[in-house]
Amino acid sequence: MAKGSVMTDQAFDISGKVTIVTGGGTGIGAEIAREFCRRGAKVMITSRTMDHLGPVAEGIRNAGGTVEAMVCDVRHNDQVEAVVQKTVETWGRVDILINNAGASFVAHAHEISPNGFATIVAINLNGTFLFSRAVARVMIAKQTGGNIINISSDAGVYGSATMCHYGAAKAGVINLTRSLAIEWAPYGIRVNCISPGPIETEGVKEVLWPTPELQERAINATALKRFGTGLEIAWPCVFLASKASGYITGVNLQVDGCMLRSGSPESRLIA
Ligand code: NAP
């Protein structure tokens, strides 16, 4: 068998893998956490409130999964370090990090305050850097290698009318992915990115597509003419976290139903 090759039936195996999912108490992150636990991973979910994390953790435990939950704001390095430390204390290592926490608000560029812009960049871009850094330091020290998966957005690829702060931050995440992939390849750490298109999650639906008309516009902006689901993001995460993607690092995988008019005001709420 060639170096690096695995039995075909184990290629997508993530059982036993210690995984941190940021923003794991709602939407896409909760779906990723549930799917990873279903496949036998040990998952730490984290976000700003136990109100979100608690019910997801309980559901996973009731289904027989292994999960821990810890409150953390990704903008604060001391809180990020505490989550990584707790994960290592609990399970001895970190194999996979999924930087899924993200936030945005809809506003015209000329009406966004400096503080509003900085906040969105801090959550989406700085938070991704802080968690990646903290986890990579453990992976490097323990010589385990590992996988980091960043959740960007179609807005990071095409730009976004009414969410320029978010588009810029998510573009930064795509670029950061490639830089970190190059820097950390010698340590056996692969770093990849997924850019979702319109995914039907409660939080995002309320902000971006609150009316049937706006929902119609959003789905018509894709070639597949429908919203994606959280599971359709979780499954590519399984792929990127497993040996099936062993020769892939630094990529941005667009999971977006083929966006036809992304970045256009037509697919976004205009005040
Ligand atoms: P969501 O339910 O709003 O998820 C965002 C998560 O981030 C929440 O769990 C939130 O939890 C957490 N979060 C926000 N600010 C945080 C902070 N400062 N520190 C720690 N956690 C924080 O929306 P979603 O649709 O599942 O989005 C998940 C990811 O996919 C995001 O990165 C988003 O940008 C990206 N995405 C989504 C879509 C879509 O159409 N749904 C499209 C492209 C990209 P707390 O409130 O508990 O902190």
Image (cartoon, grey):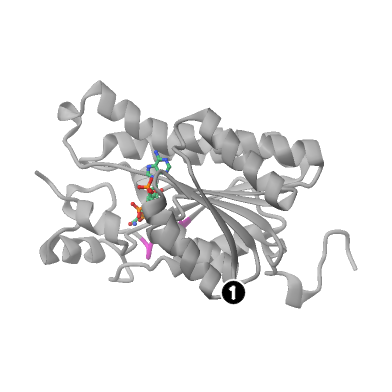
Q: Secondary structure at mark 1?
A: loop
Image quarter in which the C terminus is found: top left
Rendered view: 158 above or below 198? above
Which residue matches tag 1? 64
* Front residue of 82 and 6: 82
* Front residue of 104 and 248: 104
Residue at position x 72%, y 57% in the image: 246
Q: Is residue 121 left or right of residue 86?
A: left
Q: Is residue 212 left or right of residue 223?
A: left
The answer to which quarter of the image holds residue 82 is top right
Range shown magenta: 254-258
Residue at position x 65%, y 69% in the image: 40
Image quarter in which the N terminus is found: bottom right
Q: Is residue 255 visible?
A: no
Give x and y (percent) for residue 128. Answer: 50, 38
* Front residue of 30 and 69: 69
Q: Is residue 266 left or right of residue 222?
A: left
Residue type indicated by callout 1: Gly
Q: Is residue 203 left or right of residue 234?
A: left
Residue at position x 28%, y 55% in the image: 204
Rendered view: 226 above or below 89? below
Give x and y (percent) for residue 160. Answer: 27, 43
- The chief SS type of the magenta part is loop
Q: Is residue 15 visible?
A: yes
The answer to which quarter of the image holds residue 78 is top right
Rendered view: 41 above or below 103? below
Give x and y (percent) for residue 4. Answer: 83, 59
* Front residue of 240 and 38: 38
